[in-house]
Image (tube, rainbow, N blue to C red):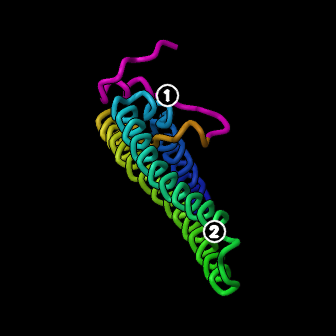
Amino acid sequence: MNKTIKSIMVACLIFTGFTINAQKLGHVNSQEIMLELPDYEDARKELESYQSDIMKELEMFQKLIEEFYQDYQQNMEGMSAETRQRKEADLMERQQNLEKKKYEAQTKLQEKEQQLLQQIMVKVNNAVKELAEKDGYTYVYEEATLLYAGGEDISNKVREKLGIAVKQD
């Protein structure tokens, strides 16, 4: 009975060892590949254009505030205390609105960047997944998160799948 249990345990250990050794591991630098895609350059240009439009709008609001302030300063002497107080409150409100618009613009810019990059990252991830399934990889790790990059670097295979020129190591 004791020998049977030992034999079963040894068989399990051997079987587990074969299973572990049979796993095919790979790693990829998807960030680097993403930067090499033509889609990334298109996204970068679109983001720059979007940012430029936002900046023009903010500059316009800034200019309007400056004109209002200059008008206030030029006509300040002839204003009653009540009018001056209303103009100052109006100026403060305009400045606060500009700050709010700047914050909203930054948020919109970040959202746009995330949206554009997410589309590209999905494309890279799908290529990695298809390659892993086709070539029988059990696990594919992101190179940036590894302390030790064991297994095969499949970055060039992913580049080929995406139609990017393969880098020579």
Q: Specify the amino acid type for callout 1.
A: Glu
Residue in front for this viewpoint, 148 or 12: 148
Badge count:
2
Find the magenta span and give its range: 146-169
Residue 9 lies, in percent from the top left, at: 57, 54
Secondary structure under tag 2 reads helix
For residue 10, which numbered disc appears in the image?
Answer: none
At 53% from the left and 31% from the top, the residue drawn is 151
Residue 128 lies, in percent from the top left, at: 37, 38
Report whether residue 25 is seen: no
Residue in front for this viewpoint, 106 or 164: 106
At 51% from the left and 59% from the top, the residue drawn is 64
Relative to 143, 34 lies left or right = left
Residue with the most extreme bottom position: 82
Q: Quadrant of residue 81?
A: bottom right
Residue 79 lies, in percent from the top left, at: 65, 78
Relative to 149, is 117 above or below? below
* Residue that badge 1 annotates: 152
At 55% from the left and 57% from the top, the residue drawn is 62
User: How many neighbours does mark 1 have within 10 angstroms: few (below 14), some (14-19), or many (20 or more)?
Assistant: few
For residue 75, which numbered disc appears in the image?
Answer: 2
Relative to 102, is 126 above or below? above
Relative to 107, is 31 above or below? above
